[in-house]
Amino acid sequence: MTHVFHRHLRHTPRLAVAASGMTLRDAEGREYLDASGGAAVSSLGHGHPDVIAAMHAQIDKLPYAHTSFFTSEPAEQLADELIRTAPAGMSHVYLVSGGSEAVESALKMARQYFVEIGQPQRTHFIARRQSYHGNTLGALAVGGNAWRRAPFAPILVPATHVSPCYPYREQRAGETPEQYGRRLADELEAAILGQGPDSVIAFVAETVGGATAGVLTPVPGYFKAVREVCDRYGVLLILDEVMCGMGRTGTLYACEQEGVVPDLVTIAKGLGGGYQPIGAVLAQGKIVEAMSQGSGFFQHGHTYLGHPVACAAALAVQRVIHRDGLLAKVRSDGEAFGAMLREALGAHPNVGDIRGRGFFWGVELVADRASKAPFDPALNLHVQIKKEAMAQGLLCYPFGGTVDGKLGDHVLLAPPFIASRDDLREIATRLAASVDAVVRAATTNS
Ligand code: PLP
């Protein structure tokens, strides 16, 4: 009997007792190769001595100081480091405890910005279907996962959802990627016009879609076209890089590869690499200036803002990423990883699409490759795949299809950046074996 309120209430998960490098161990001595960094969190793997030493040093010196009284050295240093490496024009970092808090803070920052500059009529967000921005109510409102939203829909703030950038299913025959991206930007423009352009606060999107989307990489030019549309109507662009940021796609920010600079960008997960819960919002100077010259106060806050130990851990993670050249490693090994996945899974009749960038890959399953029809969601293939992969000593991150049948069961892979090529090959091999075993059982039984 457990007293922990686990997310699944009918079974208790295995007890994890130790972790080191690419491997986690449970209480029964089973070892698991970490192919998903938990949920795209563990960028440096487990037990990194530099991060642990930085945390120890900070706990000894100053474990906690509330931000209504003090700032702290690690918070100041982390913000300096993040601004040094940030997209152009970012001037300040708001340090929170995770991804949902970061998104929630960004939404409120955007809203307060318009109140400060005399446009309080802007009350509406536009975001995308098949997206995930977190589980707190504001983040859930902009998120586009129909299943997660359903029970709470009547109590969410207003948001309109447009199409995600999902070429595998939604790029039309004969349409170039550029034309497809343009069409999506036109759809966004129509949504802004439909809503009334001066009532829209921001367009919110994951630069590379993660949870709920099975790793959706944008087509070339899509985000540039989106940026232009936002600028035309004075709408802010909030990019959510909680999952895809901090090096996961081979550059520190995924938006660097799109040639766009957002007004606000959210990060978390890889920021602290799982050593501490931490997230952040980076804001363009104009947003901070509007508040500093206006009310002088951001009307928001949490008890653990800028937690010194979390900041010390994140700073150490960032330093290791740069010192060890991990961004270049993620780019080159990421391409090799994609090739390994294609080799191991590409010919499988039920693998519809393998897509990704850097150390961030998605494998989408289909019941039929020609029609791209997803498997019946009642089969719960993603649950079986997770189970089978664990039995084979592999941690991957499968999701179910969406209720509208637009996305099949899929597996998200986000290994730590320290993974060797042998680790990556092993991940591809074990995943292929797990997928094949589960699909075979499901198609034999049905
Ligand atoms: N935004 C994105 C893009 C995410 O992928 C997630 C989590 O998966 C979140 C926000 C929410 O982050 P957290 O679970 O840390 O609250």
Image (tube, rainbow, N blue to C red):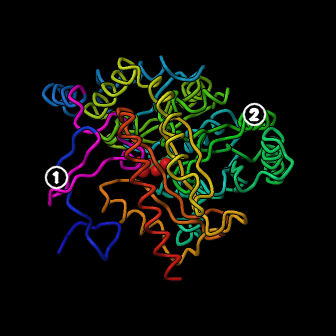
**Pointer 1 residue Cβ closer than 8 Å to ligand 1:** no
How crowded pointer 1 is (Cα within 10 Å; few <14, some 14-19, many 20+) is rated as: few
Give the left or right position of residue 192, taking residue 93 as reference.
right
| Residue kind at label 1, given as amino acid type | Val
Find residue 116 and report its image quarter. Answer: top right
The kind of secondary structure element at disc 1 is strand
Checking the image for residue 221, the label placed there is: 2
Q: Residue furthest bottom?
A: 446
Gap between marks 1 and 2, in whole Å? 46 Å
Question: Magenta segment, which residues?
Answer: 22-50
Give the left or right position of residue 63, taking residue 270 as reference.
left
- Name the spot of residue 213 as percent of width and height, x first: 58, 54
Task: Point out the tag, 1 or 2, that comes first from the N-terminus.
Answer: 1
Let me know if residue 204 is in the magenta part.
no
- Name the spot of residue 69 as percent of width and height, x first: 29, 30
Q: To which residue does mark 1 refer? A: 17
Q: Is residue 344 above or below residue 268?
A: below
The kind of secondary structure element at disc 2 is loop
Q: Residue furthest right?
A: 174
Q: Residue at coordinates 35% horizontally, 53% vertically from top-left?
A: 395
Q: Is residue 293 above or below residue 230?
A: above
